[in-house]
Amino acid sequence: MSSVDRQLFDQVMVPNYAPLQNIPVKGQGSRLWDQAGREYIDFAGGIAVNCMGHNHPALVAALTEQASKLWHVSNIWTNEPALELAKALTDATFADKVFFANSGAEANEAALKLARRYAQDHYSEEKDQIIAFKNGFHGRTFFTVSAGGTEAYSQGFGPKPGGIAHSVYDDIKELESMISDKTCAVILEPLQGEGGVVSPEPEFLQQVRQLCDKHNALLIFDEVQTGMGRTGSLFAYMELGVTPDILTSAKSLGGGFPISAMLTSSKIAASLKVGTHGSTYGGNPLACAVALKVLELVNTPELLEGVKAKQALFVEALNAINAKYNIFEQVRGQGLLIGAVLKESYKGKAFDLLKVAETHGVLVLVAGADVLRFTPALNITEEEINSGMACLDKAVAEFVAA
Ligand SMILES: *Cc1c(COP(=O)(O)O)cnc(C)c1O
């Protein structure tokens, strides 16, 4: 056994996380092994990050090939992988321009700053209101966490960035009553991930688009969780009939290597002039080389259709578990972003079930206290799904008997 263990965490790490006892050390596809050699099926995918599973040979090759060429040059120079990735992302989406950063929060930070600048450039300094949504999640920088819809996350850190209002998700009347010509941007997730795997009515997003157009406000889609094939299309907006002005991507974009991107049109991008914004690591060659390969692997009809087929397998298996144990009120979501909502009598216990599931060899996530969440690799196999669901079945049996 290694000389490091979970106890060391409490000695040397800031206590903002409370990780489980077992420490994963190796992965292959959608399987993981911990220090003691125990095997797990991974239905968590590093929180919608490891979209091609662990240790994918093409990603290992992309990373190691770049690792022997060039790691970093800063943004005083550009680099080939960043240009190739930006070209591929603009070819694949509505966008003309890309800004690279390192995390979802930073991509959203850039999006919000850009929206403020754009409003100043084209309208007035008074046009500074950002409307976000309750239960939304946009990251943990102070600006993005203040835009997020969980107040507890932004409290206790002193004065908050101002000019942010929160509307009710999927309630167009509420948004209509708040939005005005003072609004510079509306930011939302096309499907709320952390907030409980909640899809709005399709008309809601179309109506949000119309309200933004009416008031010259930019529409920002935070696709940090829903993007890169997660819902069965490259980005969720592509199937919704609504095109945002700014889109942010992270999580699956790097398949496990940290990278994020903000995508927009040339007209809007022009407001982030030289010197207005930046990031030392943004556009790092290692990250961009990996993400370029991820994009190439994800953006194929076979993989994207596979996501829908695998969603059906997940939903079928969860319904079968529910038929035996009567534990879920609803199974919902899009593609491989799936939420199983616990019944009234189990409310508040999603994390307890996550822990029992781990002891039975399957890693799952929660979204809030009542929802079990699944964000596996998009290339998870039918065999891996079946094995994981057999583990989950045993875990649920123990959980309901407790
Ligand atoms: C995870 C997430 C973020 C934050 O990403 P980080 O990489 O943790 O900064 C932002 N928005 C959404 C929708 C997310 O799911």
Image: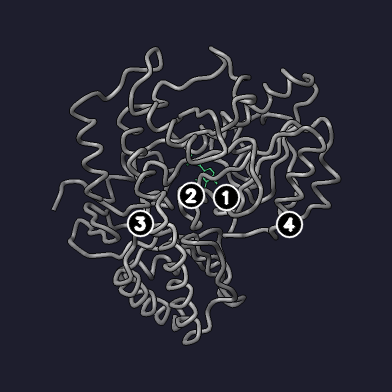
Quadrant location of residue 53? bottom left
Residue at mark 4 to residue at mark 2: CA–CA distance: 21 Å
Q: Which mark is residue 20?
A: 3
User: Which residue does the numbered mark 1 point to in the structure image?
Assistant: 238
For the residue labelled by badge 3, is the local secondary structure a helix, a strand or a loop?
A: loop
For the C terminus, the image quarter is bottom left
For the residue labelled by badge 2, is the local secondary structure a helix, a strand or a loop?
A: loop
Q: Which numbered disc flags the more N-terminal residue, 3 or 4?
A: 3
Q: Which numbered disc flags the more N-terminal residue, 3 or 1?
A: 3
Residue type pointed to by label 1: Met
Residue type pointed to by label 3: Leu
Residue at mark 4 to residue at mark 1: CA–CA distance: 15 Å
For the residue labelled by badge 4, is the local secondary structure a helix, a strand or a loop?
A: helix
Residue drawn at x 55%, y 53% as measured from the top left: 194
Q: Which numbered disc flags the more N-terminal residue, 3 or 2?
A: 3
User: Which residue does the numbered mark 2 point to in the structure image?
Assistant: 234
Residue type pointed to by label 4: Glu
Q: Is residue 38 above or below residue 123?
A: below
Disc 2: CA contacts within 10 A as few (<14), some (14-19) or many (>=20)? many
Residue at mark 3 to residue at mark 4: CA–CA distance: 41 Å
Q: Are marks 3 and 4 in contact (CB under 8 Å)?
A: no
Please state if 364 lies on the left or on the right of 69 as rendered: right
